[in-house]
Amino acid sequence: MTIASYFRLSYSVIFGFILISACAKISSPSGGPKDVLPPVVVKSEPASGAKNFSGKRFVVTFNEYIELRNVNEKFMVSPPMQRRPEISVRGKNLVVEYDDKLRDSTTYTFYFQDAIRDLNEGNPIDNYSFVFSTGPVIDSLSLTGNVLNAFDLNPPENTLVMLYSDLTDSAFIKKIPDYISKADKNGYFRIDNIKEGIYRIFALIDADNTKNYSLHDEEIAFRDSLVHISPDKDFLPDSKDTAGMKSVQSALTDTLIHKGEYKLFLFKPFKKNYYLTSSSRQQANKMIFTLSMPPDSMEFSFSLPGTEENRWLAEKSRDKDTLLIWLKDSSLYSQPVLKALIRYPFTDSTGTIIIKEDTAQMRFLAPRVTRGTRKPEPYRVISTASSGKLIPGQAISFLSQTPFREPDTSAIKLYRLTNTEEKERLSFKLTPDSINSCRILLNADFLQGENYLLITDSAAFGDIYGAKNDSAGIKFSIRDRSTFGKLIVNINNYEGKRIIQLLSSEEKLIREIPMDRDGKAEFPYLEKGMYRLKIIYDLNGDGKWTTGDFESGRQPEPVSFMPMEIEIKENWENELFWDVSAMHVKKFRNTSDVSRTRR
């Protein structure tokens, strides 16, 4: 290559590089603010708010390309259609098509919530809806409200709210509603474009997607009185509670973002039919039978035909809806199949409760033993004393995986340890648990702040199959009351039975106290931390919360919460005064107005 050719080639390469770089600089994006604006409706066919419309589709055009997110969960049409409309996106167009015959002189509202978003950034259009009428008028009345779980006043998920112009009970069961909406994550709902009239209102978690109460174990809510929708009773979110709502179901939780006019309390009805829900034999010597609901005083029994009853041990759960059978005789539990006779309450096709007798083939297939199979664990008795520290007044529990035989009290020794490490032997009392045959309680005169030694010799405990415990010695102490806090609650302004519940900050039950009149509820020996108080208005006096029943028109029993979280500290006593006249209250604030007295 000549020198001239070399320079001509180099010049061409350099010039080309500069040219490409320059082009790249010209075409590079200049940046700018991120698009945060939702799509804007440019036009629609027909226009939203159209009257006398009878078409089978509508199209909405936006100013940019769109997408749909979770439209199956968020879309809803009111009144509902028998067949769900087909929804599609075609570039900047939203297309909704349907085959249902439209009702005469009816206003239809298509709710999309925030399912419509721009394609690039996903900016949603909040609460978008499209409206048309098949008649000459667009109905314009509205209704708002809140749905809460009756038991804990928390907002439920995926709850439909329905209005019926048919005021019979059967309409909610057999028909789809005249108007429908979905409560948001805070329980708030709003139904728009309602025709003036008298309605019944319901809420439902629609398990089978039928838009009515077709399954009688679905969670529902209903209002006792009728709802009159008229221009002078057009309830919007900022409307105030009427005087009539300041009664049993009046005071709504302050935790709600929007307060609606109507309050609905969702509940799961009790099962009304008796039947045997399960029977199992997962262990050779253990069978479990479960009923659909507690049998009250009706018979629920087990037998093995031709076999004496002393060859097994039967025990029922606290609610008596579960029957646990321990086979004591090896000649029985070694059999792979046993024919058990079960007698239990059963609801027949006429609704009559009878005592049914069934034969159950109870099978147990022993697992194959291979080289990697773990050996059965040795018999163990677990004691709560092994925690090292007990609460004053707390009994020591002994737990076994199989039913206890009669313990040998002479092989159990309890000592109080003095400061000089001397041992003072104490008397004690052993009591079998009245429900659980795998639990025994030990009570003694324990003193706060004292140290103790519990010795169980070998064979002190054993089970009904001949297994025995190994000897063990456990040192433990009784905590001093100064390491706990105490809460005293003065309950007033309610006549009737009630249950006061102490809950953790996560609303787990710690303790409960039944009361039948105003007075003090005391909760001693509390760990430091944050707590909540709940009251159940025990209207039927059965000592527990009772759910509702639509068929009989019974609402679930009301509940309410102390309007503050309560802080408990060590060696502090908190005394509160709680006016429980307002039901269905759930709001939490600080405890600055709580009086405290150091003990």
Image: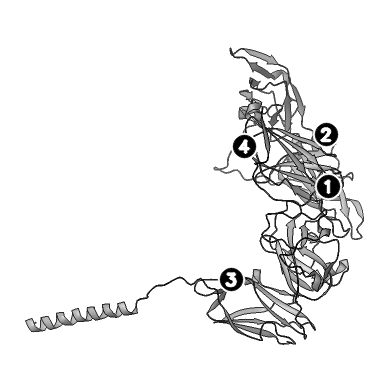
Instruction: Give the spatial CA distance, label 2 vs label 3.
Output: 64 Å
Q: Quadrant of the C terminus?
A: top right
User: Is residue 338 at least partly visible in the picture?
Assistant: no
Residue highlighted by disc 4 = 376
Residue lying at 79% horizontally and 55% vertically, measured from the top left: 250
Query: In the drawing, what numbered circle is on residue 294?
Result: 1
Residue nearer the viewer, 340 or 570: 570
Residue lying at 49% horizontally and 74% vertically, measured from the top left: 120
Instruction: Give the spatial CA distance, label 2 vs label 4.
Output: 27 Å
When asked about the image quadrant of residue 436, the answer is top right
Query: In the drawing, what numbered circle is on residue 109?
Result: none
Instruction: Give the spatial CA distance, label 1 vs label 4.
Output: 35 Å
User: Is residue 7 at least partly visible in the picture?
Assistant: yes
Q: Position of residue 465 (x, y in %)?
A: 72, 32
Q: Position of residue 494 (x, y in %)?
A: 83, 44
Near mark 1 (Cα within 10 A), the count class, few <14, some 14-19 or many ≥20, is some
| Element assignment for label 1 | loop
